[in-house]
Amino acid sequence: MNKTALVIMAAGMGSRYGGGIKQLEHVGTSGEIIMEYSIYDALKAGFDKIVFITRRDLYDEFKKIIKPAIYEKAEVEYVFQELENIPEGFRVPDGRTKPWGTGHAVLSCLGRVKEPFAVINADDYYGSEAFRVMHDYLAKVDVNARPMTFSMVGFVLGNTLSENGKVTRGACEVGTDGKLLSVHERFEIYRDGDIARARDREGNPVEIPLDAPVSMNMWGCVPAFLDELNSRFGAFLSDISGNELKAEYLLPEIIGNMVADRIATVDVLKSDDKWFGVTYKEDKPFVVESFQRLYEEGKYPKTLF
């Protein structure tokens, strides 16, 4: 059985949340943040290590929030996503303040994560079943297999939309064998009757069925993926002419390209849990109510740690 790590991406600036630090919003029955529910579910599922990807200016806040019981139950590490962490020969474009994206965030783990790992967003609730199926997969995955063997937990698009604004999702095509065929980032997604409307990377309008599977950035990866992220980042930086201030190195697109290049396969895992998260400030009351309901149903204790 492999040891397993949970990598939590918590370095986002929360721009759609009004500039606040949405990852640190208290939403649980005893004032927990969403991330604590993910940690609780991950430890219960059997994960051995927790890795936080954050910013240096948030580090002190994180140290205050992470409960001592978490350090007692698992190995804990912190890594920092920094705009200046780019390959030799490149420089940060003048005026660039936006982080380089989820792929760059996970790249911060290079040299620090050496076991199969799951990647999640700090401000998303995935549900206990999602962590159970992901852990069981990673515990048995062949880390030396080529093509690399990845996994993801897929969610139904209609269950991941916000009533308070547009969102970004990785739209997935899944084969009859349960393997990911392709994933394409879709932007500005919103519900319009019985379909969802969005825009592709070039800004063209697209329609997506509400029952389409989407990535919520819950990926299962082998350690060799970090080297692949590193080798592809330079090519990304070389190809962003004209979009230097906003271009993002995104996990769904990177993994989708690896599938297309036949150097990786992705098993799509299923979970009946409903996703929810805080994208906009107006989402918070619904999230608070949802955690209260989960407590009343007996799925979580009043206090997690």
Image (cartoon, rainbow, N blue to C red):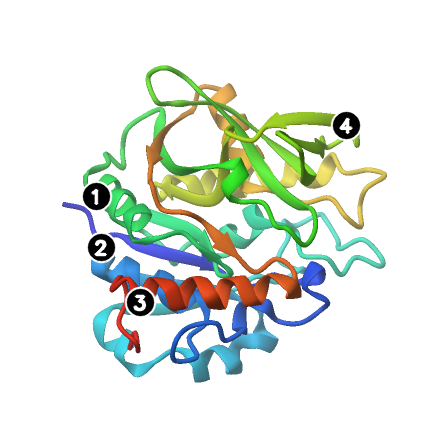
Between the C-alphas of marks 3 and 2, the distance is 21 Å
Q: Is residue 25 above or below residue 88?
A: below
**Residue type of the residue flagged with mark 1:** Asp
Helix, strand or loop for disc 2: helix
Query: Mark 4 vs mark 1: which is more N-terminal?
Result: 1
Using residue 53 as the reference point, say whether residue 177 is left or right of it. left
Q: Is residue 210 above or below residue 284?
A: above
Residue at the spot of label 1: 136
Q: Is the residue under label 2 in contact with that under label 4 (CB below 8 Å)?
A: no
Query: Mark 3 vs mark 4: which is more N-terminal?
Result: 4
Within-10-Å neighbours for mark 2: few <14, some 14–19, many 20+: some
Disc nearest the viewer among 3 and 2: 3
Q: Is the residue under label 1 in contact with that under label 2 (CB below 8 Å)?
A: yes
Instruction: Tell me the number on the disc at residue 205.
Output: 4
**Residue type of the residue flagged with mark 2:** Ala
Between the C-alphas of marks 4 and 1, the distance is 39 Å
Relative depth, front residue between 197 and 218: 197
Q: Is residue 150 above or below residue 64?
A: above
Query: Mark 3 vs mark 2: which is more N-terminal?
Result: 2
Helix, strand or loop for disc 3: helix
Q: How many marks?
A: 4
Q: Position of residue 182 (x, y in %)?
A: 52, 23
Instruction: Tell me the number on the disc at residue 45.
Output: 2
Res. 97 image quadrant: bottom right
Helix, strand or loop for disc 1: helix
Between the C-alphas of marks 3 and 4, the distance is 42 Å
> What residue is shown at x 78% (from left), y 30% (from top)?
202
Between the C-alphas of marks 2 and 1, the distance is 8 Å
> What residue is shown at x 22% (from left), y 55% (from top)?
45
For the N terminus, the image quarter is top left
